[in-house]
Amino acid sequence: MKAHSFLPIALAALAMMSCAPKEAAPAAEIQEQKAPRMEWFSQAKLGIFIHWGIYSRGDWSESWPLYNSRVSPEDYYAQQADFTAASYDPEEWVRLIKESGAKYTVITTKHHDGVALWDTQAGALSTVKTCAAGRDVLTPFVDAVRAAGDLKLGLYYSLIDWSRDDYPFMHRDQPAVYDIEKDPEKWQHFCDFNFAQMRELNDTYKPDLYWFDGDWDCTSEQWRAPELLAMVRETNPDVVVNSRIRGNGDYATPELGVPVTKPADPWWETCMTINDSWGFRKIDTEYKSEMTILRMLVNCMSLGGNLLLDIGPRADGTIPEEEVSMLKTVGRWVNKHAEAVYPTRAGIPDGHVQGYTTLNQAGDVLYVYLPYTPNESIEVKGLKTHIKNVRVVGTDRTLDWQLYNDIDWSEVPGVYYINIPEDVLDEHITVLALELEGPLTLYRGSGQVISYNL
């Protein structure tokens, strides 16, 4: 199945005229410029990703069987006849997302297979023109998100499109259809198509975030990435953009794995599946446990990032029961521990306590997340700022503690032992708020050796 854009090249050319590249600013200055628009993102902590498309019939994964030649284009695109959206309830989707505690959501407007969820005038394939649904399914979701009031909207957009014969990289281990450098007019034609679809999305929906994907085939210059971002920011200046547009975006997106150490980028998110698939697959029953997902969330928070947790609705618009249950469980925990979720920042380095940590914005409350049942007490060491109170977050309980070996002549602070009664434990992850006498300072040394001259 092939598709072409017949929009005039002048459409993209006009966009290019007002966005000539400027001399790059220093990294610190760039971060300072980004900071105001990244404020909501830095405090969101949890987002819900939605992969929904013709692949949601559940027989194959999203788009990749085309690239890997595991299914013929004819069979793959025949799935359009089964994308009915017959039970699609966008208001219920949004209600569930809000119940999860998420502060933003990202939906696939078009995956690599090129089938758009909105009534695109730039491309040939869409849920309106070529699917059984016969209607725009993106706009009702956007309307429901906007009606929610306090939920940020993210739109996923694939830069690549395997449905078109003007896109050069179509199959794994096979030569490109054409050489971009030798056939610039054909590549320009594809880029014009991308610009036209992005202009449609931007002018119609003005999202809070763009989640680009598929940038690996080409360079930033070939994608005309700076020009594309300049175009959308001309009318949507505060939109947040992920990094998958050849590094021209605002934040990093490590996938399917929480980083071991804090990323260098000040803003980042890990995107993660609930089972092993992005879109709905009939054979995939490998759902992660509730505890696993919650540990991933607090792990991301402890490193100063967000978790973008994916769900995959079926082709009829229903969400698998396991995913509904997961979002409700996450929501129970997040809402109970809200003070230790949204206003927090990255915690302290490993080694001070057996558990994940975050800090409040003032730095005078250390939150400790315990994904295990302690034996009697937990040990906290290296706090040069004294503890004045310990609370169990989400309850009205305070806890007793002992401070040992806090010697005034030693630079090494004492060690706290906080008693944890069994009846204060959360069924998943218990959270303690260690209220301090002032902003936290840490001892990070290897101890003090005392020697005597005899």
Image (spheres, rainbow, N blue to C red):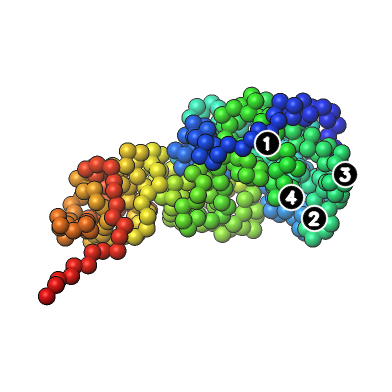
Q: Is residue 369 left or right of residue 95?
A: left
Q: Earlier in the sequence, mark 4 or mark 1?
A: 4
Q: Which residue is mark 4?
A: 217
Q: Which residue is mark 1?
A: 226
Q: Amino acid at mark 3?
A: Asp
The part of the image, by quadrant, that contains residue 206 is: top right
Q: CA distance from mark 4 to mark 1?
A: 16 Å
Q: CA distance from mark 1 to mark 3?
A: 22 Å
Q: Residue 171 — which label? A: 2
Residue 154: x %, y % from top left:
59, 36
Q: CA distance from mark 4 to mark 2?
A: 12 Å
Q: Which residue is mark 3?
A: 183
Q: CA distance from mark 2 to mark 1?
A: 27 Å
Q: Amino acid at mark 1?
A: Pro
User: Circle 3 — which element?
Assistant: loop
Q: Residues within 10 Å of mark 2 (few under 14, many from 20)?
A: some
Q: Is residue 247 left or right of residue 63?
A: left
